[in-house]
Amino acid sequence: MSKSASKSKQIMIVSAVAAVAVLAGVASYTATRPASPGASGSSSVAEVSADPSAGVYADLEAYARRDASDKLALGRADAPVVLIEYADFKCGYCGKFARDTEPVLVEKYVEKGVLRIEWRNFPIFGEESENAARASWAAGRQGRFWEFHKAAYAEGAKEKGFGKERLTALAKEAGVSDLGRFAKDSDSAAAREAVGKDQEQGYALGATSTPSFLINGRPIAGAQPLETFTEAIEAAAKTAKDRP
């Protein structure tokens, strides 16, 4: 493939992902906004095509790291489906996904070996977002990332802010044993590099809001209803099973 053709393909993929982000972001708001007085309609579900390959980009599927030593991942490294989440701890919709949807996906798919979830820190709401992202990475260094994730996304947690003392309290709640090491790791060049790498990947694929997801190369944006994720995961699992 020529250099110009490769560049054109990359632009097409980024444009497609950005378009999905805009459309799905609207769907996310529709699905999670408070019901209007007298409203009787059901929640909106973002459309997932019956064609398992529709809207899937091989370039984006390759973003999955499948690193068995990744502390910011859940599930088998060789699971047929990988869900990548780009999220910010100060994002309300990210918290909604973490509390309402992710536990169901873990029980239904991760525990059965069908799904792997890979987290990407994508802080977009300023200094506290950056601090929380580095703190989550530091908690992961002691094997407590997902416990920190749960504490930071608990109902009302983000309203308390993510200052230094608050992050230490969250680490303690998450069971991080060496708080001195946690503080050092949070402020390290390695933490900044790891978070920066995740950010660069998110921006490269065209993510403009949080949460943004890839499910085996299919972009989904926003805290969509559970059905959106289950349909996409099952379609991806079917495609993976049918591959030669």
Image: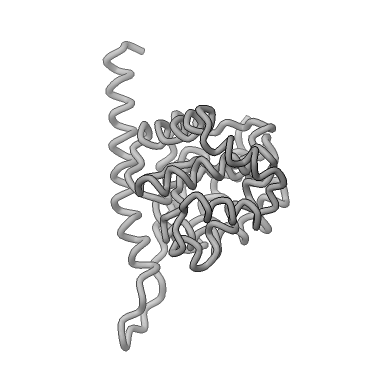
Image location of residue 151, percent across then percent down: 59, 58
Q: Viewed as shown, does residue 55 lie left or right of 154? A: left
| Residue at position x 53%, y 53% in the image | 165
Q: Is residue 49 visible?
A: yes
Q: Is residue 52 visible?
A: no
| Residue at position x 44%, y 29% in the image | 59
How many numbered badges does the structure rendering display?
0
| Residue at position x 67%, y 46% in the image | 144
Residue 199 quadrant: top left
Indicate whether 232 appears above or below 153. above
Q: Tell me the quadrant of the picture where the C terminus can be found.
A: top right
Residue 138 quadrant: top right
Image location of residue 73, percent across then percent down: 62, 41
Image location of residue 116, percent across then percent down: 63, 43
| Residue at position x 65%, y 45% in the image | 179
Indicate whether 78 appears above or below 156. above
